[in-house]
Amino acid sequence: MGHLRPRFRPREHFSGFLKSEIEKMEKMLGEFGPETITRAFCRRIATRFNCSAGRAGKPCVKWTEVQNWFLNRQSDRDADPASSHDLPQDFSVPPGNLPFRKASRDSEIAKGQEVPGVPELEFEAKSSKDGAWYDVDKFLAHRFLSSGEAEVLVRFIGFGADEDEWVNIKKAVRERSIPLEHWECHKLKVGDFVLCFQERREQLTYYDAHIIEIQRRMHDIRGCRCLFLIRYDHDNSEERVRLRRLCCRP
């Protein structure tokens, strides 16, 4: 895994689709109808977009963003509630935690096989390469070390198999942090634990941080104008950031 690993966390209401991608989704909506909002379909589309040459150097598209786009477009088309389609069975996302069962020490599920029983929640994992948090695409395998600690093999969203990494389940896997809308700035308080998007010259990554000061400002047409002084946990450096760069913990 290289030392430069750009990771982008688009807002939940993603508006960064390319014109060509929107045209393709419009066509798919007409061809496939309600199938377009299924998880499997949206995952395939997101992967296709992220692998295209046109998206090189741009933020990765999440399957949930594709799904939200299709849902919004179908809502616009289905003005008559009586004509709306039933949601496909795999649309819902079941709640739960990571139910890993310890069988024996140093045991491991074969690499390349998805871990059974892991629900389709959204998770993030901490890479041992740079200490930053990355969105998890899937859990591939798990194992127990002789020390008794459990590890899981994760694939990060936007990266291939050569970037798969074994991480400690207890210390380096958690439910995905939540991006905030501009009107939610009041939820943040001094001392809060957050995930902050760190922008450096050749590195765009997410790190744990704590808020140490807040300058409340009047919002305008651009949204929240408040400033948050944060201290990164990994190196104790401080930075003043806008709300758009912060995610709160569930």
Image (cartoon, helix red, strand yellow):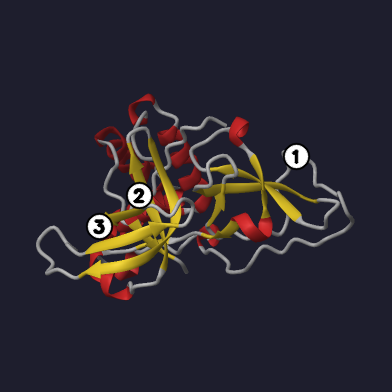
Instruction: Decide if residue 1 is on the left or right side of residue 25.
Output: right
Instruction: Decide if residue 106 is on the left or right side of residue 161.
Output: right
Measured from the top left, where is residue 155 in percent x and y? 60, 42
Question: Which-is-in-front pick, marks 3 and 2?
Answer: 3
User: Which one is nearer the viewer's eye here, 126 or 13?
Assistant: 126
- Count neighbours of disc 3 (C-alpha within 10 A) and say few if under 14, some if 14 to 19, many if 20 or more: some
Q: At 38% across and 59% down in the image, what residue appears?
A: 231
Q: At 51% across and 43% down in the image, what residue appears?
A: 157
Q: At 50% across and 47% down in the image, what residue appears?
A: 132
In three-dimensional space, the C-alpha distance between marks 3 and 1, rounded to whole angstroms, equals: 41 Å
Which quadrant of the rendered structure holds the N terminus?
top right
Instruction: Decide if residue 162 is on the left or right side of residue 54.
Output: right
User: Is residue 60 visible in the rendered structure shown here?
Assistant: no
Going by the numbered disc 3, the residue's amino acid type is Arg
Q: Which mark is residue 111?
A: 1
In three-dimensional space, the C-alpha distance between marks 3 and 2, rounded to whole angstroms, equals: 15 Å
Q: Earlier in the sequence, mark 1 or mark 2?
A: 2
Q: Secondary structure at mark 1?
A: loop
Going by the numbered disc 1, the residue's amino acid type is Lys
Q: Which mark is residue 242?
A: 3
